[in-house]
Image (cartoon, grey):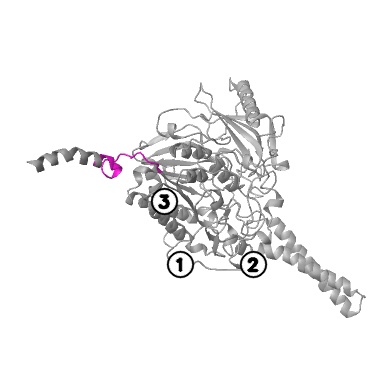
Amino acid sequence: MPGLLRSAMLAPLLLYLLLAAGSDVTGEVVDKNPNFVFMMVDDLGIGDIGCYGNNTIRTPNIDRLASEGVKLTQYIAAAPLCTPSRAAFMTGRYPLRSGMASTGSVQVLLFLGGSGGLPPNETTFAKRLQQQGYTTGLVGKWHLGVNCESRGDHCHHPNQLGFSYFYGLPFTLFNDCVPGEGSDVLVDLQLTLQHLTLMLGLGLFTMVCVHLCGVLEVSLWLLVLLFLLCIVAAAVWYVPFVLLRTWNCIIMRNQDVIEQPMTVETLPQRLLTEAQKFIRRNADRPFLLFFSLAHIHTPLFTTPAFAGKSRHGRYGDNLEEVDWIIGKITETVDLLGLANNTLMHFTSDHGGHLEDADSLIGQKGGWNSIYKGGKAMGGWEGGIRVPGIFRWPGRLAAGRVVDEPTSLMDIYPTLKYLAKDTQPDRHLDGYNLMPLLEGKTARSEHEFMFHYCGAYLNAVRWHPSDSDSIFKVHFFTPNFFPPGAGGCYDTKVCLCHGQHVTHHNPPLLYDLFHDPSESRQLTPETESRYAEILEQTARAVERHKSTFPGKEDSDDICAQSNSVQNQMSWEKILWRPWLQPCCGTFPFCGCKEDKKPS
């Protein structure tokens, strides 16, 4: 009888303990800080994914994330290129605020041995989570700089900007990483230096022949001078450019270079393995994993398991490999019992690269669906509208679709909110997404959004509170070439200044709600609110300008604040040997990754 009595008394306690155990028993989420697994693809077009309308490329794992979570249909990158877009994603601020927007022809970081990058005094969402006790990891692409003043100061390195662990590419995957794929970096300058070297060499050879044949007396000092000039010209061309694969195509684990140059063929599996290991290592504590894939930037991979399997050539093969990788990450989270306390997010840094194609492989860039433009095309929708999928079972309703304007910059304030970070912060351009994702509000806080081409304000989006319309004003647009084409096929990426753009007065105006492809320009005759739209956007631009310190009275919104150094200048971008990451003794850099388990 006493035993029965004790059992009766213990039963409520046991029931309480079982209910408190959380998702393992009831599927409910316990009140603890959630985990975050963010997966970003490089150069992915929004039209490449099944759940966004593609019915010819197989993406079942990505589609499953959307069906089990929330899909955003108007998810906007802050820039149509890697470096500025990722800077904005990390900081929750337009890239101009951190000096990561270019006023010239070069709009992304080009050399690991340059001194530009995300400033060490910037705050990333990873830094904020670290302060809340999170373990933070980045696996994959960084492309936001490494060193400032000396090799090894690592001032722009992920470890200095909030990531406890880093494994991957401090730069990016690009054509120079694979012999025979051509070059992506300053091709015109390379050719100029090459021709200069050849001309000096030919001149030296001619002078020596003339001297030896006795045709003309040539000073020995002149020959020595020409010889030295040839050596210098050859070095300026050969060392930074011909050896670019050694300098830029490397893998780092934290601050150590572990492979130089990297073996591209095995990169996808290695990145996946590292991401899975990070999740397993930290399954019993709050963590953030930013899995930044090397796909689907060129050169495209040729993984045997996927080669020739899709209906869209090598690009389709690569995209189906991406989907498989996303499936393996999702499987890892689910098998560890972490799903109900983990916010998973899938996206791209910007739209697909329309101009990237050749006769052998065909189209190597993505498809941006019905949207005009693509990568590096300023404010045209195809370059900035990206997939946005969030899954969190038990917290986010499955199958929900949000059509409101949202931004990659919203990730920063969303993570702050979910990590219960209430500490003061600097000016942010993003908003907490959770009310929209959870269906607690139907309206985005982004009444206005500002779209940049490099450091220049290119377009403004306005979502009036009394209308479903989303008006978009273009102040200038890149000049496509050849005329009538859908991209800049002469330069391969569109530029944002000088003769490369056309300014519009009055601005071009579209209603994205009724015309998402930006094909029907509005006029005073076709839009009753035409004058109001231009007036409201002009006022919004003035308010936006006032948020840049010291620029309240300036008409040039691209002018950098005196307190922010331009990280995208030639001085910052060009290669400096003393800043070059190296395994071994510079310039004899070279090593292969130890395949033993870490």
Q: Which of the 4 image quarters holds residue 427?
A: top right
* Circle 1 Cα neighbour tier, 10 Å, few/some/many (<14 / 14–19 / ≥20): few
At label 1, the amino acid type is Lys
In the rendered image, residue 17, in percent from the top left (x then y), is placed at 25, 41
Q: Please say if the residues under marks 2 and 1 sit with CB atoms less than 8 Å apart.
A: no
- Assess disc 2: are there few (<14), some (14-19) or many (≥20) residues with their C-alpha within 10 Å of its C-alpha: few
Q: Please say whether residue 176 is visible from this viewpoint.
A: yes
In the image shown, does 407 or 598 lie closer to the viewer? 598
Q: Is residue 127 magenta?
A: no
Q: Secondary structure at mark 1?
A: loop
Q: Is residue 151 above or below residue 73?
A: below
User: To which quarter of the image does residue 478 belong?
Assistant: top right
Residue that mark 1 sits on:
595
Q: Image quadrant for the C terminus?
A: bottom left
Residue 500 percent coordinates (x, y):
70, 43
Mark toward the viewer: 3 or 2? 2
Q: Residue at x 51, y 52 (%)?
A: 296
Expressed as whole percent of the image width and height from the top left, the position of residue 115 reads 66, 53
Does dot 3 land on a helix, a strand or a loop? helix
Q: Amino acid at mark 2?
A: Phe
The residues bearing labels 3 and 1 have C-alpha atoms spaced at a distance of 23 Å
Q: Earlier in the sequence, mark 3 or mark 1?
A: 3
Q: Is residue 59 above or below residue 557?
A: below
The residue labelled by disc 3 is 326
C-alpha separation, residue under disc 3 versus residue under disc 2: 38 Å
Q: Name which residue lies at 71% across and 51% down.
A: 570
Q: Pick the residue in front: 450 or 183.
A: 450
Which residue is tagged 2? 586
Q: Which residues are magenta?
A: 18-34
* Secondary element at tag 2: loop
> Magenta-highlighted stretch: main secondary structure?
loop
